[in-house]
Image (cartoon, helix red, strand yellow):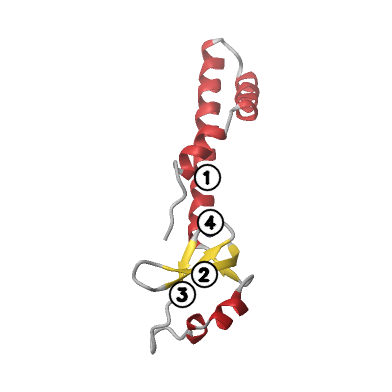
Amino acid sequence: MKQPITGFHLDEENHWVADLACGHRQHMRHDPPWMERPWILTEEGRRSRLGIELECKRCDEAALAVAQAVREALLSAAREAYEDGGLSGLCAEGRWELAQDAMRAVDLTPAIQRALGPKRQEG
Ligand SMILES: [Zn+2]
């Protein structure tokens, strides 16, 4: 997921870190010959990179974790409703309808909050 750079700061080891709009951070090392980012060393260079979008892997991971948590919540709601429908003596069609209603009604907020964790990770 692409996220624009909103600023820069130095970490405790004096390495430059880009602050992204999503709240995540990315190290911007100038470490030749492996990493050539001479622009990070000047105020002007950093200012010229503001607003530029970087690929944020942490956002991708968070989105995937949310998607998986939502899938699990839907599956478990559907499974439970389908079983309840069976116990109530509903036919297959009725159980499937019950399962669909359960998927529509399930509150996804707790699953999403669990997937995102109590606090955003930084790094
Ligand atoms: Zn991010």
Q: Earlier in the sequence, mark 4 or mark 2?
A: 2
Q: Nearer the viewer, mark 1 or mark 2?
A: 2
Q: Earlier in the sequence, mark 1 or mark 3?
A: 3
**Residue kind at label 1, given as amino acid type:** Val
Q: Nearer the viewer, mark 4 or mark 1?
A: 4
In the rendered image, the vertical position of residue 112 relative to residue 3, given as above or below: above
Q: Nearer the viewer, residue 87 or 22?
A: 22
Q: Nearer the viewer, mark 4 or mark 2?
A: 2
**Residue kind at label 4, given as amino acid type:** Gly
In this rendering, position of residue 87 left or right of residue 104? left
What residue is disc 4 on?
A: 23
Residue 8 numbered tag = 2
In the rendered image, the vertical position of residue 14 relative to residue 105, given as above or below: below
- Which residue of the protein is positioned furthest toward the top in this rendering? 88
What residue is disc 1 on?
A: 66
Q: Earlier in the sequence, mark 4 or mark 3?
A: 4
What residue is disc 3 on?
A: 28
* Whole-number angstrom distance, CA of label 4 to CA of label 2: 12 Å
Q: Are marks 1 and 3 in contact (CB under 8 Å)?
A: no
Q: Nearer the viewer, residue 2 or 70?
A: 2
Report if the beta carbon of the residue with label 4 is closer than 8 angstroms to ligand 1.
Answer: yes
